[in-house]
Image (cartoon, rainbow, N blue to C red):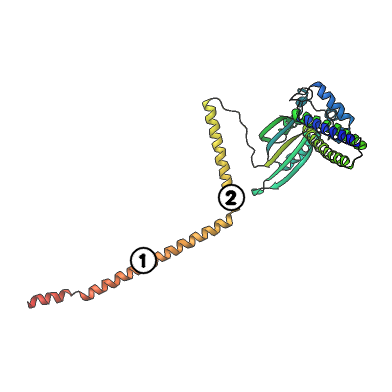
Amino acid sequence: MMKRRSLAILLTLFLLLGLTACGGSSSGGSAPSAMMNATADSAAAQNGYWKDSVEAPKEMEARSEALGGSQDSRSALPDGVKMIYRADLELETTEFERADGEIKALTRQLGGYFEEQSTRTRSGGYRSASYTVRVPAARFEEFLEQIGNVCTVSYQTQSAEDVSEFYYDTESRLETAKIKLDRLQELLSRAEEMADIITLEDAISETEYQIESLSGTLRHYDALIGYSTINVSLNEVYRVTEIETAPLTFGERMGAAFREGLRDFTSSAEDFAEQLAYSWLSLLVFIAVVVLIVKLVARARAKRASGVKKENRGLFHKKNKTAPSPETEHSEETKE
């Protein structure tokens, strides 16, 4: 009798393992059915799942409506679609402190927060800052629109990722794991053999770990879905980049080319003057070394030239001493 009961427990355990594998491999597609959504939502509500999440979708929507924001980024989506919004921005400003304060005020106004922020000073005394901003998904587009009133946007890119299939598949696996845990605990309460108890406890421990992992994954995706991520880079500049419309005619293109060339030349001249101002001491040392080398070379050439002159004079005097005088030559000719 005991052996039959033990065998029944093991068979039931194997069936539960098979049920978990089937639940893990099943996928509801990119757009899950209404029945799956209703089952998953009711199971999550019964198990108190939303208590562990960052925010329930209804609570997020209520908060966004209370803030007075539009639902443009989510209202056009079909029911049950899970989207993650991201954006990267590069901003330029000549008033760094004002821009920094307005970015922080805009983030608070839209109900967001800063995940990371840092400030540093570059060469030349110009400052730059980096922010990782998290704003409610319903205020994502509003943030991108209003940030252009704060600073000059020199670069912007944004993306949207549909994670519905993975999200609902993970949610289904979590529900299956919870059902499996309940049945394992029920079997454990009936087990009498020590071997069965040890086997069931191991299976329960593994199932609990699986539930924690799947719950953490869903919480992570709830945070990404509920709050969009925007990476912002703010740079202090001497002159902001002018964004011009594309010229159409040849004259407009030539005029734009001349203006751009003049701006580039002016900017290069200013940068060169700034570099000279920073390296004036090194430049003075370099000039002094060059002048010293030139003087030494000139002095060496002068010495070499004077030595050549003296040598030529000595040779000339020797030639005069050895050569006969004209009177001596004339007397010799008379004698002959």
Secondary element at tag 1? helix
Of the pair 199 and 169, the residue shown nearer to us: 199
- The type of residue carrying mark 1 is Ala
Q: Which residue is mark 1?
A: 305
Task: Tell me: 109 left or right of 268.
Answer: right
194 versus 317 height, above or below: above
CB atoms of marks 1 and 2 within 8 Å: no
Could you give the CA–CA distance between mark 1 and mark 2, rounded to whole angstroms? 42 Å
Of callouts 1 and 2, which one flags the residue occurring earlier in the amino acid sequence? Answer: 2
Q: Bin the neighbour count of mark 2 within 10 Å (Cα to Cα): few under 14, some 14-19, many 20 and up.
A: few
Q: Residue at x 67, y 33 (%)?
A: 156
Count up the numbered dots: 2
* Residue 111 image-quadrant placement: top right
- Element type at mark 2: helix
Name which residue type carries label 2. Answer: Gln
- Picture coordinates of residue 20 (x, y %)? 80, 32
Is residue 179 in view?
yes
Residue located 53% across and 34% down the image: 258
Q: Which mark is residue 175?
A: none
- Across and down, in percent, residue 309 comes to 33, 68
**How would you rate the neighbour count of disc 1 (Cα within 10 Å): few for under 14, some for 14-19, many for 20 or more?**
few
236 displayed left or right of 284: right
Instruction: Say whether residue 137 is visible.
Output: no
Q: Quadrant of residue 173?
A: top right
| Image quadrant occupied by the C terminus | bottom left
Residue most toward the left? 336
Q: Position of residue 244 (x, y in %)?
A: 61, 31
Percent x, y of residue 218: 80, 34
Residue holding disc 2: 275
